Amino acid sequence: MRGDGLEVPATGAPSAGPEPTGSACARVTPPVPAGGVPAGAAPTGVHPESGLDAPGSTGVLAEARPDGSRTIPSQASFGADGWDPAAARGTVAPQPCGTSPARWRQQQYGTPPARWRQQPLVEVVVPVYNEQEALDGSIRRLHDYLTRRFPFGWRITIADNASTDTTPVVARRLAGEFDRVRVARLEAKGRGRALRAAWSSSDADVVAYMDVDLSSGLEAFLPLVAPLLSGHSDVAIGSRLVRGSRVVRGPKREIISRCYNSMLRVAFHTSFRDAQCGFKAVRADVARALLPAVENDHWFFDTELLLLAERNGLRIHEVPVDWTDDPDSRVDVVATAMEDIRGMIRVARRIIAGRAGVDLPPQVRAARLPRDMGRQLGTFAAIGVCSTLAYVVAYALLREGGASSFAANFIALLGTAVGNTWANRRLTFGQVGSEGALRQFAESGVVFVLGLAVSSAGLGLLHALWSSSGVLVEIVTVLLSGVLATVVRFVLMRAWVFHPARSPRPRDTSTGRHLHRG
């Protein structure tokens, strides 16, 4: 039992104990590769690699060609520890009784250095709660797919979070039958809690999860993890709402799903389409950075992780899936929807308060793309609409109070410009705290003067052509003349006032630490 409550039985690792009763003690085991491998020497034809997975995991080895290029052979040609039986030559001594195959090979040929182990490793977590009926068939189907068609190292972890039926018994039986299946048991419910525990303890390069019903077609799994293994993306999600997906489900779930994801796009300007599909993968180093920031332990876990990932500028790869609704799903749609709405409100408050930053690993920080221009434009436009309405009200009140058109324009524009700058600083460009604020507001003053000059020129032209124009005509004139100023204002704010190279990193208001902007 781990300190965090995650119990990981020693399944999937070769046993050093005696052979079961009735087994053949003196048998031929997978022999040494071509030419023999003395202790400390690399197997012939294997290209040494670094950053490799843990002992006992199964993957592929890259075969070196004379020109230095590599090929990845079928995983089925390798044993659980990477030795290639097909490359055997010569006579092999029989294995003595009471010695496991892995221990015997280690005694005979030594332990290969870590740089020879297979790379990379993908861990697939299947969270379950009272799934005694579906678990056996689903794990066998997943195991068969990964064995036959997945060209990288892999492991399946059944994350049992407090099942009360025979699910733990079925899980342990599967782990005993298959070397690359293990069981993690938690004594508390919550899909998010199970994923957090399993992902946090993983030694894999990529961590993934899928629902136990395997509603998403497994053919999409390789396209899901490939961009993560190549380093192109940080998070990958299956999507039922993008072009190319094929979905079979009832109208009720279809409507709820589309409404929920539309709410996310409106409220958070998200670029991803489907936050709830139970088919996701994350680079392990990215997961370790994001998980401490995710507060939800239940169904909103997925959405919160994606919102934080996008807010911090991480690249999210979306894959269309073939998805068939599980008729036996026991998800309480109403309760889940209410939890999601509460989670959205909480995350929105966190973003507004400037506490959505995550301290990303240096290699991720260096490779990520700049924050999405589309999201900035959306936020800037929303703030602009609010500023415009405030300007119209202030201008009309000042004119009714007897102020001249130029004085009313100056006062109304100055007041809304201060509020506009504050809102864009915090919400559009992610700047919080006092560091750099004085310079940014001063430079925004230059942008304000530009807008004042354009609007004043418009008013002057209006009075020259139509001296008896009313307040409404003046407001329309100022707004029309301000369109060009608005475009210029956004360009100057993004490229000058709040340019990432000139702006200080935002601080977490709760800790005072610098955060990395997305």
Image (tube, rainbow, N blue to C red):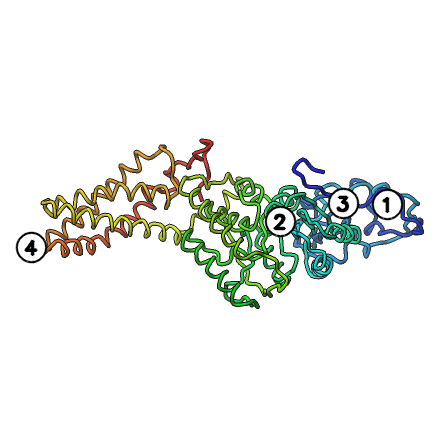
| Secondary structure beneath label 2 | strand
| Secondary structure beneath label 1 | loop
Query: What amino acid type is highlighted by mark number 2?
Result: Val
**196 and 245: which one is in front?**
196
Q: Label 1 belongs to which residue?
A: 100
Find residue 338 and name its label: none
Residue at the far top: name it. Answer: 512
Q: Quadrant of residue 74?
A: bottom right
Q: Label 2 belongs to which residue?
A: 206
**306 and 328: which one is in front?**
328
Q: Earlier in the sequence, mark 1 or mark 3?
A: 3
Which quadrant, please, contains the C terminus? top left
- In percent of width and height, residue 353 lies at 41, 39
Query: What amino acid type is highlighted by mark number 3?
Result: Ala
Disc nearest the viewer among 1 and 3: 1
Q: Label 4 belongs to which residue?
A: 464
* Mark 4 crowd level (few <14, some 14–19, many ≥20, 10 Å Cα): few
Q: Earlier in the sequence, mark 2 or mark 1?
A: 1
Q: Label 3 belongs to which residue?
A: 42
Q: Earlier in the sequence, mark 1 or mark 4?
A: 1
**Does residue 95 appear to the left or right of 300 in the view shown?**
right
